[in-house]
Amino acid sequence: MSGHQANRAFGKRKENHVLILASGDKVRHMTVRPWMAALAVSFAGVCSIGYLAATSYLVLRDDLIGGTIARQARMQHEYEDRITALRAQVDRVTSRQLLDQQVVEEKVEKLLRQQMALTSRNGKLGALVERAESSGVTTATDAPAAIEPLAYEKRADASSSGSVKAIEKLMGLNVAPVSAAAVPALAYAAPSVGESSSDRADRIFSKVTLSLKDVEREQMARVQQLTDGAARTSDAIRSIVGRAGVDLPVGDVAAMIPASETSGSADTAIGGPFVEPASNDDFGRSLAALDTALIELDRTRAQARKLPFGNPSPASDITSDFGNRLDPFLGRLALHAGIDFRATIGTRIRSAAPGTVTNAGLTGGYGNMVEIDHGNGVSTRYAHLSTVLVKAGDQVKAGEVIAKSGNTGRSTGPHLHYEIRLNGEAVDPMRFLDASTKLAGYMD
């Protein structure tokens, strides 16, 4: 019943083919399904296509090989023809170059001498420029003048082959591999119509010579700018210091030589008979002037650094200025020979400049006082101290802590009394403190 109903619902089921194999008494059978038949047909088709392709290759192989060989032969003949044409053109250009080679080499030698001179100058100038920049001397041109590699940075070979290479580079005649697709592109560019190679070389050499002259002028201008800048800086420092009441002398050449070079030590001792300089050209004189200006600038700065332009108590306010005022004890007019800083007891007091301690201890109305001699008649005094950290004869540096503030001596409360004396006469310390601000841009 169920089988009959299934056939009515889904239709009649297709029966599979059965393959029966009989051998003697043995009988075997195998059911052939549809996918097995499709696989067998596909395999037979692939074998047929492979057989046809192999047969076609064997039949047409000779024709394909023959066509390929013919194309290669045509390409080889065309390539050989192009090479022959290029060789002929190169031979013609080379023959023209050999005729002008001697003239070209003479001009190359002249350029080499010029660039060697510029190289020597740049070596001397570079050291001075580095010194000037480290000294803070600047000009409108921050970087050295750019120099063309051929004319300056690279030394060309003086031999004939090197000269030819240098000229080829100068004239833009760069040798490049010849492409088979670009037959007209020669290894050496032919001169334009109406212009020989010699004329063209003359034109290019004239241009390079003018370029070298421009480089030389730029070097001279740079040296002059640096010399003027160093001189202006020295004058500005001397002017600012002069307004504070101290005149910095302008030293001569012998005085500008550092003391370490004249001390006679084994490492820095110098000497010998005087001999005139090897060359007396304008560039040499300019370098000597720049060197002198830089030495004078260093000397001026060194002298200015010995003066008391530092603040003994940077974090403290000024409570009393220099000049006449009412004496706090007598109530009448009296000279206040310094300035007072508001400083609590124990505030660290620093030296305003390097020098030698000449007095350290109790000194009359100053109370505990430290006096430092800075040379050239300049000295500083620090009074009403609670603690003195140095003793007479000590060498102190600028900014070194020398004492602590207090309320000793003739004082109404904790503070620092600060004096500057020129040749024993008290001057207003504010002149030096104001000058220190103006000198900040010139000292480093």
Image (tube, grey):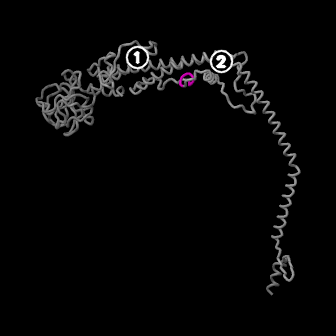
Quadrant of the rendering where the N terminus is positioned: bottom right
Which quadrant holds residue 182?
top right
The residues tagged by marks 1 and 2 sit, at their Cα atoms, a distance apart of 43 Å
Which quadrant holds residue 406?
top left
Which quadrant holds residue 348?
top left
Where disc 2 sits, the SS reads helix
Residue found at x 84% / y 61%: 47
What's the residue type where badge 1 is placed?
Answer: Ala
Tell me if I can see residue 209 in this picture.
no
- Find residue 313 and report its horizontal and vertical position in percent: 25, 34
> Neighbour class for label 1 at 10 Å: few (<14), some, many (≥20)?
some
Q: Nearer the viewer, residue 322 or 231?
A: 231
Residue found at x 45% / y 13%: 279
Circle 1 is placed at which residue position?
289
Q: Is residue 429 left or right of residue 185?
A: left
First in sequence: mark 1 or mark 2? 2
What's the residue type where badge 2 is placed?
Answer: Gln
| Residue bounds of the magenta highlight | 148-153
Q: Which of 157 and 47 is in front in this view?
A: 157
Where disc 1 sits, the SS reads helix
Residue 161 is covered by the magenta coloring: no
Quadrant of the rendering where the C terminus is positioned: top left
- Find residue 234 and report its horizontal and vertical position in percent: 35, 20
Residue found at x 82% / y 77%: 30
Tell me: residue 70, above or below residue 325: below
Q: Nearer the viewer, residue 252 or 7?
A: 252
Q: Is residue 293 left or right of residue 33?
A: left
Residue found at x 47% / y 26%: 142
> Neighbour class for label 2 at 10 Å: few (<14), some, many (≥20)?
some
Circle 2 is placed at which residue position?
101
- Find residue 303 and report its horizontal and vertical position in percent: 29, 23
Tell me if I can see residue 230 in this picture.
yes
